[in-house]
Image (spheres, rainbow, N blue to C red):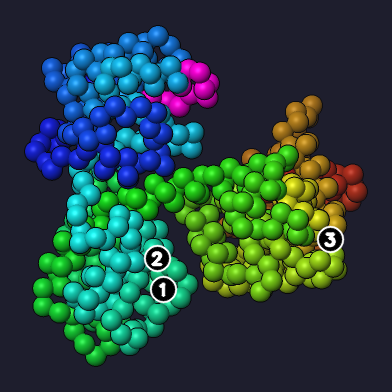
Amino acid sequence: MGEDAENRSARREEDLTGLLALTRTLLDPVALPRPSAAVRLLLVLDPLDPPPADRAGAVLVAVGTDPRSAAAEDLLRDAGAERVAAVVLRGVADRARRELLGEVAERAGTALLLRRPWADWPTVIATVRAALDNPAEDDGNLPVGDLGGLARRIAAAVGGAVTIEDPGSRVLAHHAESIDVDRIRLWTVLTGAVPEERRRAMDEDGFFRQLWSSNQVEHRRPEGEVPERMAVAVQAGGMRLGSIWVAAITGRPLEDGAREVLAAAARTAVPHLLHHHTHHDARHALLLGAARAVLDGPGSGALLARHSGLPADARCAVLAVGTPGPVDEGLRVRLEREVRLHRPRPGSDYLVLPADRGVLVLLGGLAKAPADARAQTTDYGIRLSEGLSARLGVRVAVGLGPVQARLDDAARSRRDAELALGGLLFRRERAVPDCAAVEQVADAVALRQFIETVDGLPLPVRTSVARLAEAAPQNGRHPLELLSAYLRHGEQKGPAADSLGMPRTTFNSQLAKLRENFGLDTGSADAMLLARIQLLAREHRADRG
């Protein structure tokens, strides 16, 4: 039976009603025989450990108990006898079984909460722990979850501009006591996120590491056009919930006592941010599930329209956005953030979803005329490719899916968009703009498919490329670099040498050595075709990581 030491310490007690106000989007209350029952600790049931002597007032999270089993009913009866406040079980789809468990819990006198389908156990446990560590208090009629009202109160108390941000530096609420705010704060509020270069600079100088390592208020003195600032992390139960930032109004220092105000605000903000995260995560899970079903096919365009606001019966298209090489989580988050800042032109709307190679953009509400809808899609794709490449400093390609008549058909567009992106990234020469439909890169798409099919097939002999791969570099260059340049430039020695920055005579002599030492037959069209295929396979394998 797992229990944090801090859960045993004295704290203001929460009751079930208050706990559910913060966790209802994660936990489905099936039985509440004592809604005002005090909750004093969180226990995670471990059948290998002996139960604690006193489980009264506990929220008992039964991770390993099957709600369909008789053990679940026995657990509820035992919990009632021990005055356990609530038992949390995995959700059950069978309505009759759900009702039976509810009846057992009612008779036992303990609450039964079922984990909702989109929630996982770590999130449930962390959220319940955070809620118990920081019970919602009477905050002068400020409703739980009113982050805008909280930002206004803080701004008035410190005499500055306030933003409440999530852990990814996205703005959840803001307020300023004056319109005289600095350029960075104005950009942050207008775009809904801290500028990427500013966030990167604070990350590199260790500010975020310092911020998240404690609950202390961090103070930054004015630097050039950047005014005095304070920031504090909002954390509870091991969860990073967000942060509160205060910036001085241009020409005015922050009020005396601003540090104490911000420290108190961080404690006050916990239930508000918990409420935001649980409700936002639930809505996001529903939206993501509906969008995935439509893009994977078959899904319900009507259901997605209800959760997203995209029109179900208007034209739509999918764009696949990615970069060369493996896309780690950090780059994917940056891509997603930047795509959200590049909104389509008025008249259409979009959804952004993470994908293996980068992100997918579902563009909805396009023009009724097919030609106009295609023009909208192409225009947006070009702006994404050019804008993101400039902002992120890396090559960003965009594959365009064909326009579809309604959301129900978006899976067809997604398939071609990802094929087009794969073709763009497979090509070694970069197109301008780096944006295309699948028919524009059909040869690259087909060649990529062919290379992935033949790569790794066992060969009965060691080819010249296989022998070259095992060779040591010569004069600082690997022999495969010479061969690759030679083949990329149509077997023309001069342009190949120039591309490597080598004197042409040096290139010619080294290529001759490859023929002599490794049996490379540059005069054979078949040998050069095989070499090109094998080199493409090696390069593609490296790109995929």
- Where 340 falls versus 286 (above or below)? below
Farthest residue to the left: give it.
Answer: 10
Q: Which residue is at 19% across, 76% downward?
A: 158
Give the mark toward the camera: 3 or 2.
2
What is the number of the mark on residue 440?
A: 3
From where the camera sits, is residue 413 visible? Answer: yes
Q: Earlier in the sequence, mark 3 or mark 1?
A: 1
Tell me the quarter of the image containing the C terminus. Answer: top right
Q: CA distance from mark 3 to mark 1?
A: 38 Å
- Where 89 falls versus 132 (above or below)? above
Residue 291 in the image, given as x and y percentages of width and height: 63, 47
Is 500 situated left or right of 372 in this image?
Answer: left
Which residue is the site of mark 1? 188
Q: Earlier in the sequence, mark 1 or mark 2?
A: 2
- Where 130 falls versus 486 (above or below)? above
Give the mark toward the camera: 3 or 1.
1
Q: Which residue is at 10% across, 36% downward?
A: 9
Q: Which image quadrant for residue 101?
A: top left
Residue 319 in the image, given as x and y percentages of width and height: 70, 58
- Where 69 falls versus 481 (above or below)? above
Residue type, numbered disc 1: Thr
Residue type, numbered disc 2: Val
Dot 2 lies on which element? strand
The residue segment tinted magenta is 89-98
